[in-house]
Every structure is written in structure tokens, then in C-alpha cells.
């Protein structure tokens, strides 16, 4: 289990963060200069160079978002101009993409970050540019919320698999729906029926908490508190839940750790978001006490599971039920081994999950739960202190990735296995690198006492 360093402070990461941003600068420029965008969005690296893998175009926003975050941290105007130009030139199809559940990834990373920077006065105020970003977020949020399946006790934004499918990932994509709501947008449906976007956020959060997260309450024979199901399947004829499933994990009854990390980060962010809303707004969609109770239950359960079922350094293997983990012996009682011959590490889960730990910790501290909040916050710092150094931090100037040992789709065999090795290792992913930059910026702002980084900073 994760060995939490209770003594580490945010300021102790300062030198690591400085190094990370220096390396990041080189890698963002390298991708911009050498990657052929005609091949599609860069997804993961192979032999150190970013390549693509057709499934959905869910990583393009992370590419341009990384340019924007690099400017946010370093003030490099060329990065800002490149990110702005690419957002205008390439991101419009993502705003109106009716076929995916990824709007919060692509569009919040681009339009959302740019609007936030304008609100923070890090970009010049421009009325028409502001309206352009706002309109993109408003429409993207409505398009995302339109992918809706009604079930017997609520509803959810369905995945690209179809109306029967609830993905745990989508809890973080809810950011775009919440931001659209905060910008005052209303979704119009058939016969001019108005749909409350906040209600869609709340209902999706509730459904994810109920069906994607386990609580050790006897749901099935594999019910361990905090375990997550990547996919939940419903009968769309009557709205009843049928079973867990998975797309990228080992099995329906094990925990794919990147899905776990999405839940950790997503629930923590939604709790922060709900805390900014008036009681009257929340009363109309279920009430503050009810909403915060189930969201907190899900957030704490998933974060506790991560702490318990991750190696001592906080960098997880790709699935907690991966079939060859037993060959590693007591793998939870020692640091992760990305070069082992049996099961790969997924460092991208650490990039995402660490942010969930930090945000939940801050949220609970503000709620008066000082000791519990401190545990999660210190756990997040511990993960980053190990992630932001070798063998995970990519220091090779010829490698375009920032964080090494990321996994995309182990069951499909999509990840590159170096010659002479038996498992994937040594490569990076666009989402892992973006989220490493995002959480690095989050911590950097805490160190420098700058505005707290939130997704709804774009609509304040």
C-alpha cells in the first residue's frame, strides 16, 4: 500500500516542478515541430515518438491544452499563440461531436483553459474572443448532456458504446456540462423543452456513484470498498442495471486503475464545484446534503482503495486484478517496478489520481475534517514526489513523452513492448502527460499562493 509521507510539503516539490517544466517545454516544442497532424491526434509514444491509434479523437485537446498550460506556467507567449491558433483551427469538430463522452477532456483543456486565463488576466481581455470561448463551452456542454439515458432511478451520459453504457471516465467529462451551466446556458430539446444542465451533472454523478463504485456492502462476491467498474451496463428498455463490464481493464470484476483515477479526480472536482453553488440551486436538483453525501462517499472510497492497493511509491499497476501480479510476490509492500516481466505499470493513473487525492484533501480540510483531509493531501504529494523523478520523469531529450510507463489498452495489445522485454514500458501517453502538467500547475499555484486551479475558473 502507499506509504504516505506525512512530512512532505508542497514547497518540497519546487525543484522537481522546475525541472518538470523545463523538460516539458522541450517536449511540447518537439511534438509541435515534428508530429504530422494529418495522421490524426497523437495518442501515445512508440520508441519515444508520438504516434496515433484510431479509436476516438479524444486526445487532441490534451495536445493543445499542454501548450496552453506551458504558457500558464512559464509565460512563453509562443506557446500561448500556438495553443490559441490550434484551438481555433482544429477544435471546432469536437464542440459538436455527438458521438463521444469526451467533451470535458477535449474542450475544457482548450477553450476552458483559454477562457480561464482571460478571467485571470493572464491574457488580454478581448470581448469577441471571450464570447467565442464561452459559446464553445456552452454548446459543448449541451451536446455532451444530450447523450442521455434515462434509468429507473435517474440517468447518465452514455459512452461511445451506446445508450446502455455508463463509463466511469465520464465523471470527469461532466466538467463541460457544469461549466456550460455556470455560463448561464440552457439546453433546448424537442418541443422546446428546457433541460437543466445542473440536473444532468447531478444525476450523472449520482448514477456513477451508485453503479460504478463499490462500497463493501455486499453488492456481489467481489465487492471491495472503493473498487470501480469501468463500464456499467443497463437494459435500455426498462432502465434497470444489469452488470459491470470493462473496455480496457482485465475483467468486469477487477479494477482498471486509470478508471479508478478518473473517479477519484472527477468526484473531488464535482465536490469543489457543488460547494460554489447556492443552496437554492442544489435544492432544485436533490439538495446539498444528499448530493454532497454520495459524492463524498464515492470520492473517499476510491481514494482509500487507491492508497491500499497501490505499491508503496503510489504508482499503480494497470489493473489490480491483472492475472500475473502474483508472480511479483508482495508487490504492494515495495515500490512499483515498471521494468518487470509480468504486468505493466500505468503511470497515467498516478498523474490523474494524485490530483484527486490533493483536491479531496483540500475539500475536506475546508469542511473542517482536518486530519482526514491532510491524509489525502499528503498522499497526493507523496505520489507526485515519486512520479516527478526517474524512472517516471522522462529526461531523454530525444523522447517526446514527459511521464514514462503509461499504458493505453493492455487487452488489445496496443502498447509498445521494447525489444528484449515481455511487457510494455518506457512509453508515454498524451493524457498522462497533460494531467502531469495540470497537477504540476495545481501544486505550483499552491506553492506560490496564486489563484486555486479549478475547471470552473473559466466561468467565474
Image (cartoon, rainbow, N blue to C red):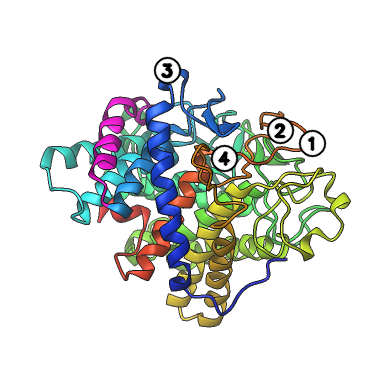
Count residues near mark 4 (Cα–Cα under 10 Å), then give few for <14, some for 14-19, many for 20+: many
Residue plotted at (62% across, 36% down) = 408
CB contact under 8 Å: marks 1 and 2: yes
Q: Is residue 87 above or below residue 425?
A: above
Count residues near mark 3 (Cα–Cα under 10 Å), then give few for <14, some for 14-19, many for 20+: few
Task: Choose between 458 and 78: the one closer to the eye.
Answer: 78
**Residue lying furthest front in this view?**
397
Count residues near mark 2 (Cα–Cα under 10 Å), then give few for <14, some for 14-19, many for 20+: some
Q: Position of residue 441 (x, y in %)?
A: 39, 57
Left or right relative to 243: residue 165: left
| Quadrant housing residue 389 | bottom right
Indicate which disc, 2 or 4, sits on the residue closer to the N terminus.
Answer: 2
| Quadrant housing residue 63 | top left
Q: Secondary structure at mark 2?
A: loop
- Residue 38 badge: 3
State how far apart marks 1 and 2 are (Cα). 7 Å
Count residues near mark 1 (Cα–Cα under 10 Å), then give few for <14, some for 14-19, many for 20+: some
Magenta segment boundaries in residue numbering: 75-96
Left or right relative to 266: residue 234: right
Residue plotted at (30% across, 48% down) = 71
Indicate which disc, 4 or 3, sits on the residue closer to the N terminus.
Answer: 3
Residue bearing mark 2: 417
State how far apart marks 4 and 1 are (Cα). 17 Å
- Residue 428 badge: 4
Task: Choose between 165 and 336: the one closer to the eye.
Answer: 336
Q: Position of residue 253 (x, y in %)?
A: 77, 46
Residue plotted at (68% across, 41% down) = 425
CB contact under 8 Å: marks 4 and 1: no
State how far apart marks 3 and 2 are (Cα). 25 Å
Amino acid at each position: 500500500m502507499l506509504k504516505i509521507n506525512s512530512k512532505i510539503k508542497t514547497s518540497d516539490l519546487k525543484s522537481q516542478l522546475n525541472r518538470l517544466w523545463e523538460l516539458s517545454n522541450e517536449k511540447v516544442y518537439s511534438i509541435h515541430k515534428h508530429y504530422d497532424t494529418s495522421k490524426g491526434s497523437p495518442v501515445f509514444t512508440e520508441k519515444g515518438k508520438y504516434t496515433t491509434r484510431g479509436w476516438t479523437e479524444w486526445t487532441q485537446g490534451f495536445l493543445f491544452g499542454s501548450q496552453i498550460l506551458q504558457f500558464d506556467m512559464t509565460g512563453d507567449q509562443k506557446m500561448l499563440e500556438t495553443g490559441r491558433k490550434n484551438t481555433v483551427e482544429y477544435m471546432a469538430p469536437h464542440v459538436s461531436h455527438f458521438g463521444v463522452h469526451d467533451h470535458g477532456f477535449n474542450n475544457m483543456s482548450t477553450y476552458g483553459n483559454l477562457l480561464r486565463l482571460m478571467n485571470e488576466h493572464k491574457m488580454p481581455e478581448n470581448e469577441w474572443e471571450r464570447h467565442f470561448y464561452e459559446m464553445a463551452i456552452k454548446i459543448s456542454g449541451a451536446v455532451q448532456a444530450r447523450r442521455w439515458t434515462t434509468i429507473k432511478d435517474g440517468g447518465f451520459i452514455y459512452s461511445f458504446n451506446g445508450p446502455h453504457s455508463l463509463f466511469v471516465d465520464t465523471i470527469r467529462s461532466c466538467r463541460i456540462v457544469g461549466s456550460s451551466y455556470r455560463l448561464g446556458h440552457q439546453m433546448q430539446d424537442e418541443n422546446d423543452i428546457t433541460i437543466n444542465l445542473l440536473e444532468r451533472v447531478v444525476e450523472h454523478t449520482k448514477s456513477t456513484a451508485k453503479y460504478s463504485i463499490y462500497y463493501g456492502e455486499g453488492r456481489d462476491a467481489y465487492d471491495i470498498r472503493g473498487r470501480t467498474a469501468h463500464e456499467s451496463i443497463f437494459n435500455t428498455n426498462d432502465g434497470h442495471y444489469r452488470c459491470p463490464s470493462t473496455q480496457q481493464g482485465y475483467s468486469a470484476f477487477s479494477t482498471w486503475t486509470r478508471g479508478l483515477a478518473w473517479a477519484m479526480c472527477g468526484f473531488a472536482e464535482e465536490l469543489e464545484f457543488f460547494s460554489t453553488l447556492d443552496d437554492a440551486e442544489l435544492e432544485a436538483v436533490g439538495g446539498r446534503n444528499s448530493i454532497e453525501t454520495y459524492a463524498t462517499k464515492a470520492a473517499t472510497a476510491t481514494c482509500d482503495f487507491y492508497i491500499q492497493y497501490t505499491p508503496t511509491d503510489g504508482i499503480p499497476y494497470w489493473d489490480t486484478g491483472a492475472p500475473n501480479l502474483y508472480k511479483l510476490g508482495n508487490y504492494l509492500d515495495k515500490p512499483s517496478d515498471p521494468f518487470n516481466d509480468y504486468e505493466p505499470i500505468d503511470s497515467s493513473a498516478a498523474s490523474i489520481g494524485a490530483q484527486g487525492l490533493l483536491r479531496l484533501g483540500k475539500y475536506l480540510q475546508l469542511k473542517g475534517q482536518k486530519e482526514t483531509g491532510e491524509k489525502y493531501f499528503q498522499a497526493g504529494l507523496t505520489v507526485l514526489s515519486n512520479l516527478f523523478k526517474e524512472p517516471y520523469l522522462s529526461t531523454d531529450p530525444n523522447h517526446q513523452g514527459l511521464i514514462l510507463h503509461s499504458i493505453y489498452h493492455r487487452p488489445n495489445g496496443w502498447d509498445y513492448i521494447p525489444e528484449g522485454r515481455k511487457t510494455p514500458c518506457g512509453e508515454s501517453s498524451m493524457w498522462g502527460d497533460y494531467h502531469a502538467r495540470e497537477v504540476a500547475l495545481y501544486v505550483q499555484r499552491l506553492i506560490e499562493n496564486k489563484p486555486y486551479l479549478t475547471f470552473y475558473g473559466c466561468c467565474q
